[in-house]
Image (spheres, grey):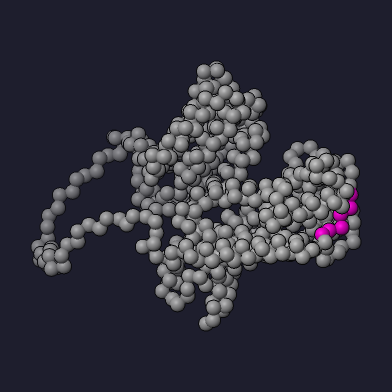
């Protein structure tokens, strides 16, 4: 089999497996929903108080930005498990024994990621035609004007995302939770490049290219007009005026800049192939477990013969009655040790520094940001709640112990609450000294909400990825931007004075009941 055939075969098998999942339909449905929000002016692209007329160019440009921003985020998390799945199913060990090189394997996986993400873009592009007709401002559809931004802007972005996902899976420390969190901030930085004055070559999403072209069409100067791309929540704001944008003039410079991103995606795949361990545990960055002294072969045979000849009477110690000796405190201590296991001294030093900062910063806004950082630092501890039993294949032991729901599940949840209380203790101490009871209540509700959120999603999904993604997104939009409806921490006085903390208290109760229901479902399997 040729190299090209091996890459295509690997990509085809992985592609067909992915598009049959419900998560693919869910991600695709969200992309289409965001496209719908652009047509009803909930997702807006504005120059000051102006927007473009919904012709083929404007609809194509808007939905291209939706695709290259939203799908580059949600799509990354959807495709970032292709190598991990081969590890978990032990297919990787079989592939490692074949002549398939790791370079061809990585390129096959990257191509599969690219095909899945491109399919999402293609469906969004076809829906743009329908959305233009539904909007009805300009019913004359120009196929090339509408579809060209998807081809030249969104597709190169998907190629980079596909290779980045494979690269993260090839680096041991980034293939799990740290990589999920790190990519979110990398995505934020890439999105910010579109709003900056950097050259077009640095604009992966194409947002800056559309901004410059639209401003030229509206005859506006960047220094005299604001530019915004946002999701509106609440009352819809009608723009004061419209202008006509007829699309891009695809110059050689723009096309070369987009081609550079394709080249970068290939280089990222090559780097991933260089770092890939080919499923060899000897290349894993972990110390091997100590090997105990084995019994010599002849001695083992002798012992076996003796045991077969004469049975040995063994005295077994009876287990204590669990009803007579409740051990909840010991279970809680064990869960807390498991949560904190593996963190070095520097991790605790950073946590202590953030706790002190959340108490010592004089400005309330600054203290809120310090609390947000303090409650982001233990995210990997919380994301392990409810999934350790499945992750380490100990569910048969844990779930067969007495009272797995009445004792073990509350102990797991309470260990996460203790981590939240300790990490945010500085902020609480400052509120206590200021006698800010409303703020203290909002803080306590946040300390309960976070581990409950993690536990419910962990029990039902069996993985920490959904919590890591949703929590990071909620954390960024709410506490970091002081947006009261999403500020589940009560990190600002404006949030503590509202009814939103009570809303999150009710949501915490619902999530806890969901965690119990999920654990009952696990016991029945």
Q: Nearer the viewer, residue 223 or 126?
A: 223
Side of 226 where 498 appears, left or right? left
Q: Residue at 12% across / 65% down in the picture?
A: 299
Q: Position of residue 158 (x, y in %)?
A: 65, 61
Determine the residue positioned at 65% across, 33% down. 482
**57 sits left or right of 104 in the view:** right
Quadrant of residue 254 within the rendered picture: bottom right
* Left or right relative to 75: residue 83: left
Q: Is residue 117 visible?
A: no
Residue 439 in sight here: yes
Does 95 sit above or below residue 155?
below
Q: Look at the picture and state if 112 lies above or below 382.
A: below
Find the residue positioned furthest to the bottom: 1
To which quarter of the image does residue 203 belong?
bottom right
- Which quadrant would the C terminus be assigned to in this image? bottom left
Residue 414 forms part of the magenta stretch: no
Q: Against 104, is 484 above or below?
A: above
User: Residue at point 75% right, 46% down?
Assistant: 229
Front residue (pair 148, 126): 148
Residue 14 position, x and y percent, is: 56, 68
At a point 51% along the width and 63% down the height, the residue shown is: 272
Q: Which residues are magenta?
A: 243-248
Give the camera-side residue of 491 and 208: 208
Q: Main secondary structure of the magenta part?
A: loop
Count of marks placed on residues: 0
Q: Position of residue 169 (x, y in %)?
A: 50, 59
* Place of residue 446 in the rendered image (x, y in percent of width and height, measured from the top left): 55, 33
């Amino acid at each position: 089999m040729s190299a090209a055939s091996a890459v295509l075969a690997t990509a085809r098998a992985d592609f067909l497996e992915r598009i049959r999942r419900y998560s693919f339909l869910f991600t695709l449905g969200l992309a289409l929903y965001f496209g719908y929000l652009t047509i009803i002016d909930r997702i807006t692209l504005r120059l000051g108080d102006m927007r473009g007329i919904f012709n083929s160019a404007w609809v194509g440009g808007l939905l291209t930005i939706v695709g290259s921003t939203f799908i580059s985020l949600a799509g990354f998390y959807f495709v970032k498990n292709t190598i991990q799945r081969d590890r978990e199913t032990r297919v990787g060990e079989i592939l490692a024994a074949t002549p398939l090189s790791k370079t061809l394997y990585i390129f096959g996986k990257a191509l599969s990621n690219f095909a899945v993400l491109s399919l999402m873009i293609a469906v969004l592009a076809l829906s743009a035609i329908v959305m233009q007709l539904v909007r009805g401002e300009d019913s004359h559809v120009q196929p090339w004007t509408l579809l060209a931004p998807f081809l030249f802007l969104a597709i190169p972005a998907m190629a980079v995302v596909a290779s980045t996902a494979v690269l993260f899976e090839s680096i041991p420390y980034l293939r799990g939770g740290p990589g999920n969190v790190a990519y979110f901030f990398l995505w934020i930085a890439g999105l910010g490049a579109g709003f900056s004055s950097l050259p077009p070559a640095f604009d992966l999403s194409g947002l800056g290219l559309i901004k410059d072209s639209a401003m030229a069409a509206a005859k506006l100067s960047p220094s005299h007009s604001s530019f915004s791309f946002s999701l509106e929540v609440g009352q819809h704001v009608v723009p004061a005026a419209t202008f006509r944008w007829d699309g891009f003039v695809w110059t050689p410079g723009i096309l070369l800049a987009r081609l550079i991103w394709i080249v970068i995606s290939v280089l990222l795949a090559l780097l991933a192939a260089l770092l890939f361990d080919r499923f060899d545990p000897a290349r894993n960055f972990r110390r091997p477990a100590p090997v105990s002294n084995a019994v010599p072969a002849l001695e083992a045979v002798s012992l076996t013969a003796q045991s077969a000849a004469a049975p040995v009477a063994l005295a077994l110690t009876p287990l204590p009655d669990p009803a007579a000796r409740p051990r909840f405190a010991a279970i809680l201590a064990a869960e807390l040790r498991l949560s904190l296991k593996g963190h070095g001294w520097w991790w605790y030093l950073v946590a202590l520094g953030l706790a002190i900062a959340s108490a010592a910063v004089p400005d309330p806004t600054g203290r809120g940001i310090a609390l947000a950082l303090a409650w982001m630092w233990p995210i990997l501890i919380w994301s392990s709640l409810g999934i350790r039993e499945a992750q380490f294949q100990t569910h048969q032991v844990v779930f067969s112990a007495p009272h797995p729901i009445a004792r073990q599940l509350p102990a797991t949840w309470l260990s996460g609450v203790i981590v939240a209380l300790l990490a945010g203790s500085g902020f609480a101490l400052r509120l206590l000294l200021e006698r800010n009871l409303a703020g203290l209540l909002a803080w306590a509700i946040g300390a309960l909400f976070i581990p409950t959120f993690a536990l419910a999603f962990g029990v039902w999904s069996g993985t920490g990825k959904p919590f890591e993604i949703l929590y990071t997104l909620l954390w960024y939009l709410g506490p970091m931007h002081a947006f009261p409806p999403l500020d589940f921490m009560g990190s600002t006085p404006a949030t503590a004075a509202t009814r939103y903390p009570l809303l999150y208290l009710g949501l915490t109760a619902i999530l806890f009941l969901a965690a119990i229901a999920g654990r009952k479902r696990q016991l029945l399997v």
